[in-house]
Amino acid sequence: MAYTFSWEAQGVYKRFSGVVTAAEYHRSQIEFTGHEKFDGAHYVINDFSDIERFVITPEEAEYMAAYSIGPHLANPDLRVCYVTTDPSIVSLIRESKGLSIYTLEAFPTLASARESLNRRQVES
């Protein structure tokens, strides 16, 4: 797995490729939530459009949802976006909505994720 991590004006963009494991994805969460800019971030985009496979168990998904409770105290309004058309990942996101303290959103394209983020900023 490889990922790039890019800070933007209002948040962070993470682009994943190859086979992504739960441990590797969690490492990217820790990198993001531990950064000095985290408290002021409005969003995180997790772009999975170039991955081959996401290897995660239900227990690992539950652990990552529990992990997000601490960061939520520092940044309760963070939007968590995923870019994917993979049915298994979309299903995992849907199933994880009940576990995560954050609202999880899935988009078929990066453009649609950014459009939604921009629309919400205008509405605020």
Image (spheres, rainbow, N blue to C red):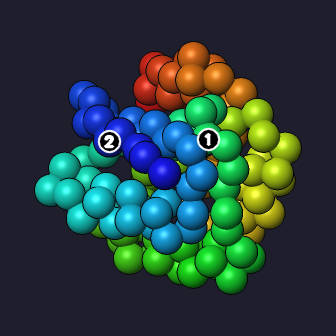
In primary-sequence order, the first of circles 1 and 2 is: 2
Label 1 neighbourhood size at 10 Å, few (<14), some (14-19), many (20+)? Answer: some
Residue 90: x and y in percent read 78, 47
Say what amino acid the circle numbered 1 marks: Ile
Please state which of residues 82 and 3 is positioned toward the viewer in this rendering.
Answer: 3
Give the residue drawn at x 24%, y 64%: 34
Residue 98 visible: yes
Please state which of residues 101 and 60 is positioned toward the viewer in this rendering.
Answer: 60
In this rendering, position of residue 41 left or right of residue 59:
left
Label 2 neighbourhood size at 10 Å, few (<14), some (14-19), many (20+)? Answer: some
Q: In this picture, is 123 found above or below 60? A: above
Q: Secondary structure at mark 1?
A: strand
Please state which of residues 108 and 105 is positioned toward the viewer in this rendering.
Answer: 108
Residue 72: x and y in percent read 41, 67
Residue 51 numbered mark, or none: 1
Give the residue drawn at x 75%, y 50%: 89
**Closer to the eye: label 1 or 2:** 1
Q: Secondary structure at mark 2?
A: strand
Q: Which residue is mark 2?
A: 5
Q: Quadrant of the C terminus?
A: top left
Say what amino acid the circle numbered 2 marks: Phe
Residue 12: x and y in percent read 34, 39
In the rendered structure, are the residues bearing label 1 and label 2 in contact, judged by CB atoms less than 8 Å apart?
Answer: no
